Image: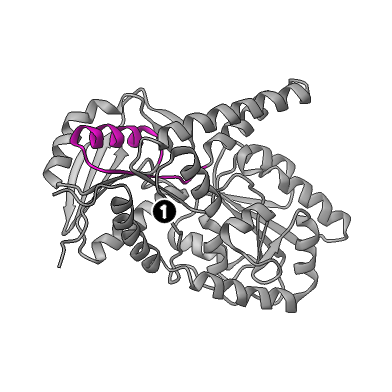
Amino acid sequence: MSSPLRIALFTDAFHETNGVATISRELAEFAHSRDLPFLTVRGSDRTLLSRRESLEMLELKRGPAAFPLDKALYCDPFLTRHRKFVRERLRSFNADLVHITGPGDLGFLGLWVAHDLKIPLVASWHTNLHEYASRRLDGLLSFVPRALRNRTALAAERHSLRGLLRFYRMARFTLAPNEGMVNLLHTNSGKPSFLMAHGVDLTSYSPSPRPQAHPFIIGYVGRLTLEKNVRFFAQLERDLIAAGQHDFQFLLVGEGGQRDWLKKHVKHAVLPGILRGRELAAAYAGMDAFVFPSRTDTFGLVLLEAMASGLPVIVSPETGARVEIEHGAAGFLTENFSESVLELMRNGAKRGAMSLAARRFASSKSWCGVFENLYQTYEAGLEAGGSGRRG
């Protein structure tokens, strides 16, 4: 019987509130629960090595040159100063595979030390950074004529995608959360690429009875940034009021550069900031519907959390297809968000049926099954990459 794979995960986010951090924490906990040898390497405000049975945790202090990519999310361009220390730690751990979560400071460090030690490298794609670049540039150039702004943003997106694909070519194999990105990575790198599914904690997120008389709560969880298209909620508010609806409220959970704009322009909005743990679960349970206007997400873990909480979700067709949501069952895949929200507000029976379907859908996405498949994918990727395990 072969020994379990020894995985070293270099993640650009771990304690933060985003999808990469959630996946990284859940993967580490899965490895610990199965007594699998697992090393996490992540950024911190201090450098510290700790251990919990089979789980080793290496935190690396980010220096004064670290700059914010978003709220509480930093990148240190000089994090490679830890290279020698990390290389020795990785050699001692005797990793079979280094897994990096993208082209951030930890991703580049992981790539470098894996190359030094000739350890096979897998890179997972989690964020459409090229689309983020396009939308943020579009926002910064709001004073520029629309036609020129569109051309500039599209050029930035094209060049950013080209650079990202060059980075991912350096991996032995790649992982992505949807089939479209799996195919794009394989086509542009010539390397094996596999699906990395996402899951949800079905114990933490579950439906809760709602009081009979209450405002209709329209929820959102995520970063409050331009690339998440959160300014859309102002238009949705206008549409609902024009349709004669007044007894509703937006619960917009998260932080980001658009928070002050939303506070000013969305009168029915409650903005509690970042919520975690029981507070976040309670926020989901208090919603009636979940609206996710982002078109840049590769998957959207918050959609699974919302559905596990029994919420019908309203998303764009491209986002819904990535998560494999069936239109009209657990939610709506639509370009007309306002019409779908109004249907749920007016039809309690429809909302109830969708709530049950949403919970059923999420129940098939447990983290345990996701990571059991991931370890099989690790093995398959090593074989397909022509390396097998390190001898």
Q: Is residue 312 above or below residue 105?
A: below
Q: Position of residue 149 (x, y in %)?
A: 71, 24
Seen at 16% across and 59% down, the residue is 53
* Nearest to the observer: residue 316 or residue 280: 316
Q: Is residue 31 above or below residue 172?
A: below
Kind of residue at badge 1? Thr
Residue 79 belongs to magenta span: no
Left or right for 111, reference 391: right
Whether residue 299 can be seen here? no
Q: Is residue 62 above or below residue 277?
A: above
Residue 115 belongs to magenta span: yes
Left or right for 80, reference 90: right
Q: How many marks?
A: 1
- Secondary element at tag 1: helix
Seen at 24% across and 25% down, the residue is 81
Kindly identify which residue carries mark 1: 22
Q: Position of residue 42 (x, y in %)?
A: 30, 41
Query: Which image quadrant: the N terminus?
Result: bottom left
Whether residue 111 can be seen here? yes
Q: Is residue 258 above or below residue 66?
A: below
Q: Position of residue 332 (x, y in %)?
A: 70, 63
Seen at 80% across and 71% down, the residue is 346
Left or right for 388, reference 199: left
The answer to which quarter of the image holds residue 292 is bottom right
The answer to which quarter of the image holds residue 216 is bottom right
Mark 1 packing: few (<14 Cα in 10 Å), some, or many (20+)? some
* Nearest to the observer: residue 154 or residue 241: 154
Seen at 62% across and 58% down, the residue is 321
Q: Which residues are magenta?
A: 102-127
The answer to which quarter of the image holds residue 144 is top right
